[in-house]
Amino acid sequence: MNPIQIPRGTQDLLPQVTPIWQFIEKQAQEICRLYNYQEIRTPIFESTDLFLRGVGDTTDIVQKEMYSFEDRGGRSLTLRPEGTASVVRSYVQEKMYGQPNQPTKLYYIGPMFRYERPQAGRYRQFFQFGVEAIGALNPAVDAEVISLAMSFYKNIGLTELKLVINSLGDKESRLRHREALINHFEPSIGEFCSDCQSRLHKNPLRILDCKQDHDHPLMKTAPSILEFLNEESKNYFEQVKSLLDQIGIQYVVDPTLVRGLDYYNHTTFEIMGASFGSISTLCGGGRYNGLVQELGGPESPGIGFALSIERAILALEAEGKALPGVQALDAFVVSMGEPTEEKALSILYRLRQAGFSVDKDYMDRKMKAQMKQADRFQSRFVLLLGEEELEKQVINVKNMETGEQEAVNWDDLITYLERQLRRNQ
Ligand code: ATP
Ligand code: MG
């Protein structure tokens, strides 16, 4: 029978790589602790309507990438393609806006699903770490969110980072810019892809984000949003930039940076890293002041970002950074002969209870093969138990780094190992 293959665009994270994932997830949790963002876990699937409204029907995600299905009760559900819509749904549903601890600062880590053409850095199931700060329209919050993302990347070990920011302004600025974009593209819209043609009146800003028509000459000459910002929006953007300067975060302003999602306004940003394949964007984020209302809540401004763990790891690899591997075992119990078996097991469990990582052979291996197994786990100590040791109530402790060996009384074993391992650290 043919073995069944993993679905296209997904990957098994095997024990060789899960330590990297655990490291990165820990760094994400830790940076969120420092910035006082709390974790939220929402369902993997949601009503399809949530994404139609929350992501926007002119986006690639909604038009081409969603995994939608009907359940047995006839409801249309979708595997979440991103996290913001779910977080905001929960914010509204749980009436978080009514709580005194505003702004509401949340983070999430989990799988997202998009039907995409798989390549390095682009998968159909990928893991995002994202944060959302909802309830405050304050440039300091924009700077905080950007700083959190940058610090996260620095903490995992990335150095080649480039932050690009832009402002899409408020509603009024966006409307004026929208008119200018329509006037700019309309006469030649026939030269653009069919997606762009349908975007022209629905959401012309999205034309600037088109991957197909990226090099069309009209893209370069398109009216810049920055020229359409009203005083208030300009002022807001100036404050965000000046705060970033104060914190010591470098950035480049790129007026063509628009995000794929529809409800963005004011600050948008992207973080690029060392490239892998054709991709270098690691993180995208921005402000979405209209989203909470769009999902049935009160007017509450929000800002957030999302980044994928896969791309963070690819960037670390592209920079040639050493990545954490499987953790070494503290000790491996090597027992010789049937009569020692029971004692070997009791030592194994006693050590585990005391907090050591310990294993033993379960395959009836000969002594030499057991030593090999200890090596495979990079065990720092091997504990040898033969019939002679059994009689004397000792165990031979071999330090695998120095080769030194010492007989230790069973009762002293825990203290002995504690001392040795501390010395080795
Ligand atoms: P792209 O332009 O690369 O398609 P996007 O605009 O669709 O990105 P967002 O929806 O903003 O991306 O998602 C935020 C981050 O999630 C991206 O910066 C990227 O790190 C990551 N990401 C998006 N899609 C994928 C994917 N298919 N596989 C892995 N990571 C992804
Ligand atoms: Mg995409």
Image (cartoon, rainbow, N blue to C red):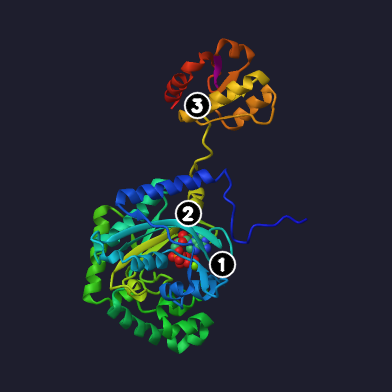
Q: Which quarter of the figure has residue 15?
A: top right
Q: Is mark 1 within 8 Å of ligand 1?
A: yes
What is the x, y in percent for residue 376? 61, 32
Q: CA distance from mark 1 to mark 2?
A: 17 Å
Residue, disc 2? 309
Looking at the image, which residue is at 35% across and 85% down? 179
Looking at the image, which residue is at 30% across and 54% down? 249
What amino acid type is highlighted by mark number 3? Leu
Mark 1 surroundings: few (<14), some (14-19) or many (≥20) residues within 10 A: some
What is the x, y in percent for residue 333? 58, 24
Mark 3 surroundings: few (<14), some (14-19) or many (≥20) residues within 10 A: some
What is the x, y in percent for residue 377? 58, 32
What amino acid type is highlighted by mark number 2? Ile
Give the mark nearest the N terminus, 3 or 1: 1
Q: Which circle marks residue 351 in the picture?
A: 3
Q: Nearer the viewer, residue 171 or 381?
A: 381
| Residues at marks 1 and 2 touching, judged by CB atoms closer than 8 Å | no
Which tag is nearer the camera, tag 2 or tag 3? 3
In the rendered view of the protein, which quadrant contains the C terminus? top left
Give the mark nearest the N terminus, 1 or 2: 1
Residue 339 located left or right of residue 254: right
